[in-house]
């Protein structure tokens, strides 16, 4: 049974990747942070299944800055594949906590690479990078050779980590890959991200729990995909015969206004009647257009996105309607 270790296993991507690996017959180990709460909603359906949890799925407590404990977990579990998904991934929040963002996303990745460098049996390593490393690119679409030009603390931290993964691959022969992921969404997306903020508000407005939605820049455009598709690309990256970096994207671009239209159409409301612009949600520096060229992933990994944005947004709205109705009933 192939063994894999995942950081960030309780997040959106971690939960989808866990499901994918379990379906492929893997034994999955996840690193989680110790906290007073043991509620991990994205994994509840797995940890509550006695045929899965404690048999093929195991959780281990550690802080990523605790090098000794992380090394001990690696030595104990001896994974064949190591997926590093953990990090402070909210771009807006990174302006408020730039030091911790860079410490966690940048230095945290370097510490893991240093641990791997010293292991006798090195697992293949996947770092979940981000389109934010491109910032304000001079070319569009962006591919693996596009120069990095980050304009947010999160983007700077990810650019550092991405370069370190390349450096350790080239200098020390570690099988390390960057999955340069453009925005990817799902019903499991955190509520602070704009897509989930929109779908949750659409559901709550439909059910009479709120009347308006405050947003920042409605003209911002992104290449949005489905998280379930993107973790498949991560897995495929580590199945390739040689390590490389891959842009994971749809190649299609949509604006925040389009996402609003999709979400409010699902609840049969006019978004313009409910959305207000609040300057506090406009970032000090922001990108206007990021769109990826996934040609390398398509040609070398046989990967392509299967679900379009409209379908994902509909799924998110329906899930938020169900959650909100349960809240009202409780």
Image (tube, grey):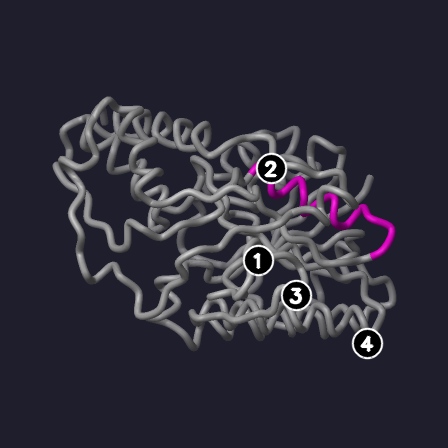
* Residue on which the image places disc 3: 70
User: In the rendered image of this protein, does residue 239 appear above or below residue 87?
Assistant: above
Distance from Cα at disc 3 to Cα at disc 4:
23 Å
The magenta segment is 228-242
Sort mark 2 into few (<14), some (14-19) or many (20+) by Cα contacts within 10 Å: many
> Do the numbered discs 3 and 4 sit on residues whose CB atoms are within 8 Å?
no
Residue 193 is one of the magenta-drawn residues: no
- Circle nearer the N terminus (1, 2): 1
Sort mark 1 into few (<14), some (14-19) or many (20+) by Cα contacts within 10 Å: some
Instruction: Give the quadrant of residue 201.
Output: top left
Q: Is residue 296 left or right of residue 65?
A: right
**Of tags 2 and 3, which is closer to the observer?**
2
* Residue on which the image places disc 2: 229
* Residue on which the image places disc 1: 61
Q: Residue 297 at x, y = what percent?
A: 71, 46
Q: Give the dominant element type of the magenta stretch: helix, strand or loop.
A: helix
The residue that appears at 71% across and 55% down in the rendered structure is: 82
Q: Residue 262 at x, y = what percent?
A: 34, 31
The residue that appears at 71% across and 65% down in the rendered structure is: 72
| Residue 271's disc number | none
Query: Could you say whether the residue bearing mark 3 is in a helix, strand or loop?
Result: helix
Residue 229 is one of the magenta-drawn residues: yes
- Circle nearer the N terminus (4, 2): 4
- Circle nearer the N terminus (1, 3): 1
* Residue on which the image places disc 4: 171
Given residues 219 and 66, the one toward you in this image is 219
Distance from Cα at disc 2 to Cα at disc 3:
28 Å
Q: Residue 86 at x, y = what percent?
A: 55, 58
């Amino acid at each position: 049974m192939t063994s894999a270790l995942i950081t960030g296993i309780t997040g959106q991507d971690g939960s989808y990747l866990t499901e994918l690996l379990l379906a492929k017959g893997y034994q999955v180990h996840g690193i989680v942070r110790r906290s007073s709460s043991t509620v991990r909603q994205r994994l509840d359906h797995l940890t509550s299944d006695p045929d899965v949890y404690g048999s093929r799925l195991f959780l281990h407590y550690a802080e990523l800055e605790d090098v000794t404990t992380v090394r001990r977990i690696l030595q104990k579990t001896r994974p064949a594949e190591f997926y590093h998904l953990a990090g402070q991934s909210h771009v807006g929040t990174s302006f408020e906590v730039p030091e911790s963002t860079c410490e966690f996303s940048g230095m945290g990745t370097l510490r893991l690479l240093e641990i791997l460098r010293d292991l006798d049996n090195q697992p293949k390593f996947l770092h979940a990078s981000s389109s934010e490393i491109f910032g304000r690119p001079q070319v569009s679409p962006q591919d693996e050779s596009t120069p990095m030009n980050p304009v947010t603390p999160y983007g700077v931290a990810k650019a550092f980590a991405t370069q370190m993964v390349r450096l350790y691959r080239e200098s020390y022969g570690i099988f390390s890959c960057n999955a340069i992921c453009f925005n990817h969404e799902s019903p499991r997306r955190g509520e602070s991200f704009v897509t989930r903020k929109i779908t949750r508000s659409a559901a709550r407005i439909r059910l009479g729990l709120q009347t308006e939605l405050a947003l920042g820049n409605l003209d911002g455009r992104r290449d949005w995909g489905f998280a379930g598709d993107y973790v498949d690309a991560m897995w495929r990256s580590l199945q390739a015969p040689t390590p490389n970096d891959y842009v994971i994207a749809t190649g299609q671009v949509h604006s925040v206004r389009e996402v609003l239209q999709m979400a409010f159409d699902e609840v049969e409301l006019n978004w313009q009647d409910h959305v207000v612009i609040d300057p506090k949600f406009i970032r000090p520096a922001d990108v206007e257009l990021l769109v990826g060229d996934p040609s390398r992933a398509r040609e070398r990994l046989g990967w392509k996105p299967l679900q379009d944005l409209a379908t994902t947004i509909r799924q998110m709205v329906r899930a938020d309607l169900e959650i909100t109705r349960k809240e009202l009933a409780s």
